[in-house]
Image (cartoon, rainbow, N blue to C red):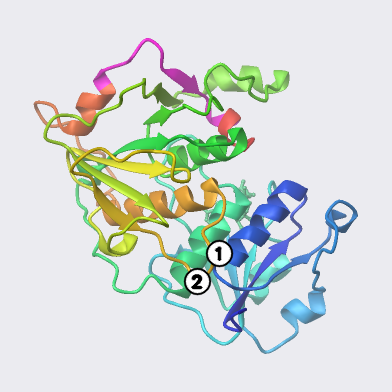
């Protein structure tokens, strides 16, 4: 059943693969998906549902723009939407067109604490926005101050698709992770050719904050005394946003499907949506957003010096495995 509560609108989206992923994000939340097609998308996507400017902006239903535009409020604090709202996401390079931003009842952004990548894939952004704008009630209070000392480690477990893995790594960098462990048993990342653009190579050298992707090895086990929280749609546990996802010694595991055997003693956090949870990037985007939300924002503008001794996070950072893969921010924005 399709909910009349909202619809997802892609404004000027140009990549057909992103359009299909957006339709999947909408299905996850049982809302319709339409496109204001200013970039010839209909020529590449059969049976595209479209909306024109008059129908999008001229009606009585509220428009909620999802973009990191100046003055946008945090999606975590925006409250839930009502009354057939159009939730609009924008073009992969240019974002939402100005006429939508002007007409919007509100504009929300997904806070991006990462240094290097400051946007999500458009379909991932849509899934995160729908998660918070349509529900996620009874959320835990965010932490802060000193969120970084509580950032959980992250294990991506057996992603089955190269693009979904890349898109997830982009999300991880944008949400502030500097290191991610990847169980690549499906062989989608290490040793496979990644999209390389020569013109971007020079730019890559100037970036100082690559994402470190560490192979999990054959028998991954959590650090001694650590807590493991397995997050997914099919696990038996409390809702994601009511589960503590942060804290020193915590590892979040996000399996792609059910091919990953949880370690003994693991806890579970369930990602529930009105429709079936779609592709991996949408699931991981929601989990990482919720963990970042729970971490909270750093208070004050001046970063604190590191404390004496090792926190769990800094302990992880100081160990640079020789087989780690450094992925540059420019490369992540291709996903
Ligand atoms: C890749 S982004 C566009 C990039 C944008 N022009 C820029 O460089 O800042 C494509 C669309 O995804 C959505 N999006 C991505 N990251 C977002 C974020 N952090 N907050 C809100 N929307 C986001 C927005 O709808 C945006 O128009």
Q: Earlier in the sequence, mark 2 or mark 1?
A: 1
Some atom of ligand 1 lies within 8 Å of the CB belonging to the residue at label 2:
no
**Does 100 sit left or right of 217 as displayed?**
right
The quarter of the image holding the C terminus is top right
Secondary structure, mark 2, is loop
Q: Is residue 327 magenta?
A: yes
Would you identify the image quadrant in which residue 196 lies?
Answer: top right
How would you rate the neighbour count of disc 2 (Cα within 10 Å): few for under 14, some for 14-19, many for 20 or more? few
Residues under numbered marks 2 and 1 in contact, where contact means CB atoms less than 8 Å apart: yes
Residue annotated with mark 2? 274
What is the secondary structure assignment of the residue under circle 1?
A: helix
Could you say which is closer to the camera, residue 251 or residue 199? 251
Picture coordinates of residue 138, whole percent (x, y): 29, 73
- Could you tell whether 247 is left or right of 175 in the image? left
User: Is 55 displayed left or right of 225 in the figure?
Assistant: right
Residue plotted at (39% across, 23% down): 214
Q: Furthest-top residue in view?
A: 322
Above or below, 16 against 218 in this view is below
Reply above or below: 224 against 23: above
Q: Quadrant of residue 312?
A: top left
Relative vertical location of residue 154 with respect to residue 5 in this rendering, above or below = above
**Residue found 59% across the figure and 30% down from its top:** 330
Q: Which residue is mark 1?
A: 28
- 64, 196: nearer the viewer: 196
Between the residue at mark 2 and the residue at mark 1, the CA separation in whole angstroms equals: 6 Å
Please tell me how crowded label 1 is: few (under 14), some (14-19), or many (20+) other residues with Cα within 10 Å: many
Residue range (magenta): 318-330
The residue located at (26%, 17%) in the rendering is 319
In percent of width and height, residue 5 lies at 57, 82
Residue at image position (55%, 52%) is 124
Q: Residue 294 at x, y = what percent?
A: 28, 56
- Quadrant location, the N terminus: bottom right
């Amino acid at each position: 059943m399709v909910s009349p509560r909202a619809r997802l609108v892609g404004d000027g989206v140009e990549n057909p693969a992103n359009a299909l992923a957006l339709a999947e994000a909408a299905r996850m939340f049982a809302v319709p998906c339409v496109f204001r097609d200013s970039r010839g998308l209909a020529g590449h996507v059969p049976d595209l549902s479209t909306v024109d400017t008059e129908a999008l902006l001229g009606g009585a239903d509220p428009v909620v723009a999802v973009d990191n535009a100046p003055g946008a409020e945090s999606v975590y604090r925006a409250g839930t939407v009502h009354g057939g709202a159009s939730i609009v996401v924008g073009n992969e390079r240019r974002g939402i067109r100005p006429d939508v931003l002007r007409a919007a009842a509100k504009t929300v952004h997904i806070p991006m604490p990462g240094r290097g990548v400051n946007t999500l894939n458009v379909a991932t952004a849509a899934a995160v926005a729908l998660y918070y704008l349509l529900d996620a009630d009874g959320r835990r209070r965010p932490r802060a101050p000193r969120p970084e000392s509580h950032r959980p480690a992250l294990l991506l477990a057996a992603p089955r698709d190269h693009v979904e893995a890349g898109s997830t790594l982009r999300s991880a960098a944008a949400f502030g992770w500097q290191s991610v462990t990847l169980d690549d048993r499906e062989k989608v990342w290490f040793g496979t050719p990644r999209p390389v653009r020569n013109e971007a190579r020079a730019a890559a050298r100037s970036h100082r904050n690559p994402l470190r992707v560490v192979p999990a090895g054959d028998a991954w086990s959590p650090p001694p005394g650590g807590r493991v929280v397995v997050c997914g749609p099919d696990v038996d546990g409390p809702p994601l946003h009511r589960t503590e996802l942060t804290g020193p010694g915590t590892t979040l595991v996000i399996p792609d499907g059910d091919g990953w055997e949880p370690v003994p003693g693991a806890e579970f956090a369930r990602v529930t949506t009105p429709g079936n949870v779609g592709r991996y990037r949408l699931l991981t985007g929601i989990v990482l957003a919720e963990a970042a939300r729970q971490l909270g924002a750093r208070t004050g503008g001046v970063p604190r010096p590191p404390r004496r001794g090792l926190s769990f996070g800094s302990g992880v950072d100081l160990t640079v495995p020789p087989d780690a893969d450094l992925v540059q921010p420019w490369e992540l924005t291709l996903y």
